[in-house]
């Protein structure tokens, strides 16, 4: 199974939602070890989840924008 998580709020200066997304991202690999997890992040975001099935894709569009 593959999951894509819009984690743009977890950017370089995370908001309240961003802190929630970071905490969720840290726990998801252990909760779903067979799942492929892809996180959409903003440029400059540090990795918050790790694992062999975790990947990050940089998305330059701001969260909640019309281009999303």
Image (cartoon, rainbow, N blue to C red):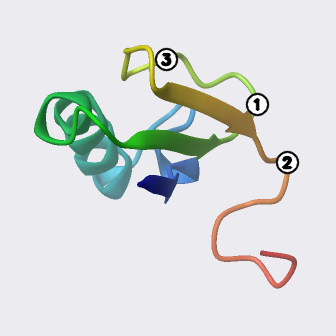
Q: Determine which residue is flagged by label 1.
A: 43
* Disc ID at residue 11: none
Q: Is residue 8 above or below residue 54?
A: below
Front-most of residues 18 and 4: 4
Q: Is residue 56 left or right of residue 43?
A: left
Label 2 sits on a secondary structure element that is: loop
Percent across and percent down for residue 1 are 41, 54
Front-most of residues 51 and 39: 51
In the rendered picture of this protein, how many numbered marks are placed on residues? 3
> Residue placed at 62% from the left, 31% from the top?
56
Q: Is residue 67 left or right of residue 30?
A: right
Q: Determine which residue is flagged by label 3.
A: 47
For the C terminus, give its image quadrant: bottom right
Percent across and percent down for residue 55 are 58, 28
Q: Are marks 1 and 2 in contact (CB under 8 Å)?
A: yes
- State the separation of the CA atoms marked 3 and 1: 11 Å
> Residue placed at 60% from the left, 25% from the top?
45
Front-most of residues 47 and 51: 51
Front-most of residues 54 and 13: 54
Q: Is residue 55 above or below residue 21?
A: above
Mark 1 Cα shell of 10 Å, populated few (<14), some (14-19), many (≥20): some
Q: Determine which residue is flagged by label 2.
A: 60
């Amino acid at each position: 199974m593959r999951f894509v998580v819009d984690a743009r709020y977890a950017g370089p200066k995370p908001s309240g939602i961003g802190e929630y997304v970071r905490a969720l991202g840290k726990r998801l690999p252990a909760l779903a070890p067979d799942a492929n997890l892809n996180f959409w992040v903003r440029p400059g975001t540090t990795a918050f989840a790790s694992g062999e099935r975790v990947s990050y894709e940089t998305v330059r569009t701001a969260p909640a924008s019309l281009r999303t």
